[in-house]
Amino acid sequence: MNFTLHIWRQECAQAKGHFETYKIENISPDCSFLEMLDILNEQLISGAPHDTQPSTPNAPIAHPVCFDNDCREGICGMCGLYINGRPHGNDDGITTCQLHMRKFKDGDDIWIEPWRAKAFPVIRDLVVDRSAFDKIIQAGGYISTTTGGVPDANTIPIPKHDADMAMDAASCIGCGACVAACKNASAMLFVGAKVTHLALLPQGQVEAADRVHKMVAKMDELGFGSCTNTYACEAECPKGIKRQSIARLNRQWIGSLLGRDGR
């Protein structure tokens, strides 16, 4: 399979970025998207001939295309790329590393960009700084109350419905697709998932009110936008986190102001 790749190149957050165009040929349909980028980078490193057509007068950047990845199994959340106008590409319920080239047609033009959000500044090319998510977790996304050892915690009865919802919310990998998909760059789905999976468990209920206030305040401080209920976040989440997490986050926040349980 042959493709024309239009890739966003940017030296750093302060630099002006631009698209560069590359032709890549003889790619197996079973090749993953990141493996395809690896092949492109090998060609760039080796100096193999390739067509480069910058969309601006800037001189072509010689270094390989920078992109973030780690596990390549869809569980670490690092491989966030905006592909043909969709976070993680043109398939549902997957991360970029799980996207295969058979999802495209031979000869396709593929546009590849980084996450675009004020809270996710570009480090280089397709790599963005997602440490804003870490700061939200540090603000309150944890349990610090004493619950005893693991055997003690496991003896606390939890309704199956609550346990299932907590586990579903805990499947969030913090990739940032919800932010990239949202026209407001909102992190409400991410924060809602983290609040939900702790607030539904007895161990997390002690700090529930304080947690939601700290995490929402930090989210606002870092420059994430507000939720206007377009549900693009739910549609593009690779782990299928539901918008009900946002509703529960809102109930928790309002309930904490009124001194009620917002679960």
Image: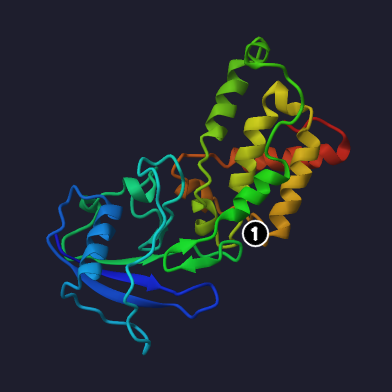
Q: Residue at x 67, y 27 (%)?
A: 200
Element class at badge 1: loop
> Is 168 in front, or is 221?
221
Q: Which quadrant is the N terminus positioned in?
A: bottom left
Query: Pointer 1: residues within 10 angstroms few (<14), some, or many (20+)?
Result: many
123 relative to 135 in the view: left or right: left
83 relative to 240 in the view: left or right: left
Percent x, y for residue 166? Answer: 59, 28
Q: Residue at x 67, y 48 (%)?
A: 136
Q: Which quadrant is the C terminus positioned in?
A: top right
25 relative to 78 in the view: left or right: left
Amino acid residing under circle 1: Phe
To which quarter of the image does residue 221 belong? bottom right
To which quarter of the image does residue 244 belong? top right
Q: Residue at x 71, y 31 (%)?
A: 143
| Residue 90, above or below 148 | below
- Identify residue for label 1: 224
Task: Kindly give the residue lying farthest to the front in the view shown.
Answer: 46
Percent x, y for residue 31? Answer: 21, 50
> Is 9 in front, or is 196?
9
